[in-house]
Each structure stands twice: as structure tokens, then as C-alpha cells.
Image: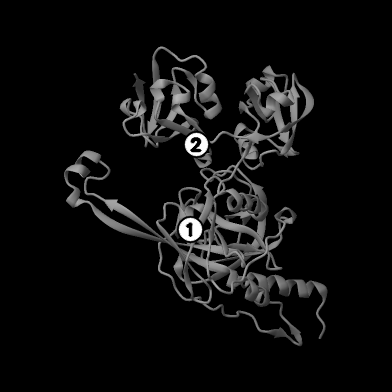
Amino acid sequence: MALSTPAKTLIALSAAAAFGGFAATAMHHALAPDVQAAPAAMAVPATAALPAAVGTTPLPSLAPMLARVTPAVVSVHTKQRIRVSPFGNDPMFRRMFPELTQERINESLGSGVIVDAQRGLVLTNHHVIEGADAVSVTLSDGRTLNAEFIGSDPDTDVAVMRLRDAGTLTALPLADSSGLRVGDFVVAVGNPFGIGQTVTSGIVSAVGRTGLRGLGYQNFIQTDASINPGNSGGALVNLSGQLVGINTASFNPRGSAAGNIGLSFAIPANLVRQVVDQLVTTGEVRRGSLGLEGRDLDARVAADVGLPAEARGTLVTRVWPGSPAAAAGLRAGDVVVAANGERIDSYAALRNFEGLQPVGGRVVLDVRRDGRPLQVTATLREAPKSLAGADLDPRLAGAVFAELPERLRQQGLAGVLVESVARGSRAAANGLRAGDVVLASTAGATRDLPSLRASFTQAPPQLALRILRGTTQGELLLR
């Protein structure tokens, strides 16, 4: 008996739903990438929950597509050597009792995707391989190979590795993720909990998702396909078997006991492609910058600049001389409400937009000046990556400052990171340590590297820094 079109559609949706996987677990109390230590295991075969046919009509199946996809999804194993002391991190006691310090190997497990079979390129999340001393990859056919690190970008959570002399490999083509729509079917493939390669399915719940605390630059695909611990770095594919995203995180504020609440996130393929091209070519990612400082627009400020109280945007508080923003004609007091047609509701949203743009990219900004609409075009230049303390003030000689990781800025922190301090340097003698965050100084604002540089145009007679070290704030007087 022939089936009507609605009946066929119902059967197709039922079949897709049958591929839903485990009860989902996500991160505890926060949005954060998840990597769980777990032993590798053999793949678990799926069992059919529906008959093969209804009458003479075969049921649709994802199996033919997955037969092409699953050989390209791998398990990523990392090892990290750490030294453990009963005195914790106290350097004096560690030196006094070195015999009590023991070396321990931490092992973790994630997932990855082969995207170039000829060159052996494998993608995963930065947080999967962060700090690892050794990384190996287990293919779907059971082979385990050592992986060579190519590069990674912490702020988009993308990392690239290479498999040498791997023989025949299967790679996934990257889709144009800009064509994804809410409601499109997607399938997640990875190695959750280390139990073996597993497939879950769902739909695209949202695209362009931002504003998630602690996850760096954001333009996520949100899906209700389960993404569990160990799935990080795995594949999110469309029904054609093309890679539309790299799975990165899930959200469950109640922890694993709550089960799957359908909030999982993946990095879109178009962003992945841009990052990977730079990492493979140069080993680093260069980002564009407008060269301005701003703040969120609230009702009081909106009234001051002639906008309705409910208006949203970024109030420009400072434009750096010679910057793309200055060349475009932006001024302090302007309000940026959109960039390339994308709404800008806050300063964090503008920073996020900037961080996803390449150097040399042209940006059209919709601005309100004295309450009137204005449109300007800026060509982005590379944002500074680090700054030597000696170039600012002799009292900082030996220190190198860098921008804060974007995941910390997403948590509301503003300042600059002390990237390194040379042993025996003046900065070291003054008490600066690598990992400190400079929140403010007597020289002026320290929201980021440009503001830090600008604050030292005239060195203050007395220089004090407000430092965040771990969870403790304090003042540091430099001599």
C-alpha cells in the first residue's frame, strides 16, 4: 500500500529520532568545555528499534551516510606529566623536601575529526590537548597513531594535529555552515565517556549563539543532539555527511544527574575553516581590531546621547590614534548598534564580533551620533598580541604582557595578563609573576594592551599595580 506524503515524513522523523543516544551529561555549574579521563573501548553497534520496512516501503536510515562519516571520527588520547607535592604549590617547601614530590601521569580522552586525508590533518578542541605532553589518535579501525601538534587557538577552542605515515585515511568535507537553519537535522559523532564511537542525532536549535560565559569568541551552533564528556572535538554533520561543526561543549547547571536538557554547542565549519587555514599556514591566528574602547549602553547614557532609554549598543569611550576606528571617522560618544548587519547590544558583543574577523576585513558599522543614524566602513588591522614591559617603563623590564584569554573576558574580567617574567629581571625583583592579571595601575587604565600602552605616555613618579593572583587581589609597588 502506498504511503501518503505526511506518513512518509512521520516515518522519516521517527527514524531520525531513533538515533538519539545516551542520557546526556554536561558540565557542572558552568558552561565549559568537557574532557573526561576514560579508557578507550571498542565501538558499540547500534540496534534497530524500528522494523526494516512498513509493507513494501523501506524505512529511511542514516546508516549509509554514517558508514562514510564514522571512519573519519577518531578518539584523541592525551598524557600530561605533573609533579605532586604534599605541600601543594608552596615553592619553599617543594625545594626543601624534593624527595616528597612525585610525578604522576594524567590521561584524558576526547574526540577528533580527519579533514584532510592526504596531509593527515585532524581537528579537535584546544581544551582536549591543552597542556598535553603526548597525544595519540585511535582510528575507527583500531589503529593507534602518534599525533604531531600543528597549532591551536584557545579563544575559538580549535586545534590541529597531523598524522604522519598513517596509510589510508577517510576525511570529512567541510560544509558551508552559513546555510544552516534552525530545524535542520544534524548528527553528532564522538567517543562519549570513553565507551566507544557513538552517534546521537537532533536538530539545529539556534545559530550564531553568543553570550555563553567562559567560552571565548562565540558563534556557536546550538543543537539538542547529545554532546557528552569525551565528545569534545567530535563531528557534527548534516544528513549529507558533511562536517557542519566541531562539538565543543554542553550545558547542564545541575550536572550529570539531570540528564539531557538539550543544550549542546558546536563551532561552525566556516569559523573552523578560517582558523585552520591560518594555523596550518603560520601556526598562529591573527585577528582584526577596530582600535577602540567602549562600554555598554544603559538608560542614563542613552538619554545623554539622545537615544531612547531602551536602546542597546556600545558607547565608544575612546578611539586610539591611527586605528581603523579613527580612520573610519568614529569618535568618542558614538554608539555602535550593528556591525556588518549583526546587532551589537553590548561592548562584549562588539569584542566578540572583532575577534571573529580576519586582518584586512572590511566592517560596515551602523552608528548613532547625537541621536542620528550614520554608517561608516573600517578596514581591520591586526590586534597586538604582546607588549614588552621595558617598552613601557624600566620598572617593568623583564615582564611581557598579553591580552587576557577571551574566556576570562566573557566572565567579566578586564585587564592584561603577565605572560612571562624573566628570572633576575627588575620586574621579578618587584614581585611580578607569570600568570598575574593587572587590573589597574597608577599610570592609568589597563583594560587591554592598547590602553596599557596609552597609559604610559608619561611614566608616573610612583608606580603601583593592582594585581589579581589566583583569587586574591593586592597592590604591588614597583621600584
Crowd band around label 2 with a 10 angstrom C-alpha radius: few (<14), some (14–19), many (20+): many
Residue 311 in the image, given as x and y percentages of width and height: 70, 28
Q: Is residue 325 visible?
A: yes
Of tags 2 and 1, the one toward the viewer is: 2
Crowd band around label 1 with a 10 angstrom C-alpha radius: few (<14), some (14–19), many (20+): few
Residue in front for this viewpoint, 95 or 124? 95
Which secondary structure, mark 2?
A: loop
The quadrant in which residue 54 appears is bottom right
In this view, the residue farthest toward the top is 461
Name the quadrant of the C terminus.
Answer: top left
Name the quadrant of the N terminus.
Answer: bottom right
Name the amino acid type tagged 1.
Ala
The residue that appears at 42% across and 52% down in the rendered structure is 131
Is disc 2 in contact with disc 1, using a CB cutoff of under 8 Å?
Answer: no
The residue wearing badge 1 is: 258
The residue wearing badge 2 is: 404
Name the amino acid type tagged 2.
Leu
Residue 252 in the image, given as x and y percentages of width and height: 50, 53
The quadrant in which residue 58 appears is bottom right
Q: Is residue 135 above or below residue 342?
A: below
Q: Is residue 379 above or below residue 315?
A: below
Q: CA distance from mark 2 to mark 1?
A: 33 Å
The residue that appears at 45% across and 59% down in the rendered structure is 256
Q: How many marks?
A: 2
Task: Say whether residue 229 is left or right of residue 72.
Answer: left
Which secondary structure, mark 1?
A: helix
Residue in front for this viewpoint, 376 or 35? 376
Residue 229 in the image, given as x and y percentages of width and height: 48, 60
Residue 357 in the image, given as x and y percentages of width and height: 66, 41
The residue that appears at 44% across and 17% down in the rendered structure is 442
Instruction: Identify the mark nearer the N-term, 2 or 1.
Output: 1
